[in-house]
Amino acid sequence: MKADGRPRTAREKYGEELKLRRMAVGLTQEALAREVVCSPTLISHYEAGRRLPSPDDARRIDQALGTDGFFERWLEDLDPAFPHYFSEVVELEREATEIRQYGSALIPGLLQTKEYSRAVFQAYRPNYSAEELDELVVSRAKRASLLDKPSAPVAWMLLDEGALRRRVGGPQVMAEQLHKVADMADSGRLRLHVLTLASGAHALMESMLYLLSFADAAPLAWVEGLRTGRLMDDPALVAGCHTSYTLALSDAASRQKSVALVRSIAKEHELAHHRARHH
């Protein structure tokens, strides 16, 4: 845990170990930078956990420190597939004991099917290749496996009805996606609630929200916009986010009604797919 009460990310642990190994052999950041052929500032970023070295840099670090491939091998476990502003959240959620998420415009990544993910990634990019989409989908599926593990955090998912009705990838993809969400709820892997369109104004209308709680650290809140996001650790801000989530949750349908609504909308998508095939 860090001094401010926030859990250390895997990147920060990597950087701390790099600093310890560098000091153990008596090298300054400047001296290591000369061996790696980079700037001392970049070494500083590595040690602070703000950046990850490339595989080539990690290899040169191992050579300079005599660490026999240690940092190059560890680098393989630190997934660089996510945007830099979100990578810290991906690492922190692995340490969380409880997560609470609100999906306003789309189904959250932890719940997505591969075809739904593919349609989302395709929509985000003016130019794309099949190989690029495949890599993004695999990374998202790997992250989503978090909820399949025995040590999975307690998961609350609050979904807007609009996200259930928007036909991302077409009606068949949506039907499969919603059945997956309902199946996860029925199996006890998540607590599902839906904010219906009829519920009107609610406390989370302005933003998606992701809340992370930990066994031995202060809770965090994450909000995200287009190509950006913010991780909040200020206690007052995080408490306010929890209050907003609780207020929105109080306006949502019950768990039973929410699962039934998700199943019902999935069937509407299936009927639309069936009609499209026969016309």
Image (cartoon, rainbow, N blue to C red):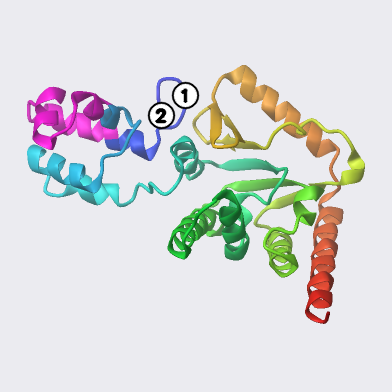
Q: Residue at x 60, y 35 (%)?
A: 224
Q: Is residue 28 visible?
A: no
Seen in the picture, residue 61 relative to 132 is either above or below; the reply is above
The N terminus - image quarter: top left
Residue at image position (24%, 29%) is 42
Q: In this view, does 275 lie above or below 46?
A: below
Outermost residue toward the right in this view: 198
Q: Which residue is drawn at 44% across and 58% down?
A: 132
Label 1 element class: loop
Q: Where is residue 276 in the image (x, y as percent from the top left)?
A: 80, 75
CA gap between label 1 and label 2 equals 6 Å
Pointers 1 and 2 in contact (C-beta within 8 Å):
yes
Q: State the residue at coordinates (76%, 54%).
A: 166
x, y percentage for residue 235? 59, 19
Does residue 233 appear anywhere in the picture? yes
Q: Quadrant of the C terminus?
A: bottom right
Q: In this view, does 101 lie to the left or right of 118?
A: right
- Which residue sits furthest bottom? 278
Disc number placed over residue 226 in the picture, else none: none
Viewer-proximal residue, 188 or 261?
Answer: 261
- Residue 217 left/right relative to 60: right
Task: Determine which residue is flagged by label 2.
Answer: 1
Where does residue 37 sit, x and y in percent of width and height? 13, 34
**Residue extent of the magenta highlight:** 15-44
Amino acid residing under circle 1: Gly
Secondary element under disc 2, as helix, strand or loop, is loop
Q: Is residue 137 left or right of residue 173?
A: left
Residue 220, given in percent of the width and then of the height, sits at: 56, 30
- Verify whether residue 234 appears in magenta: no
* Residue carrying label 1: 5
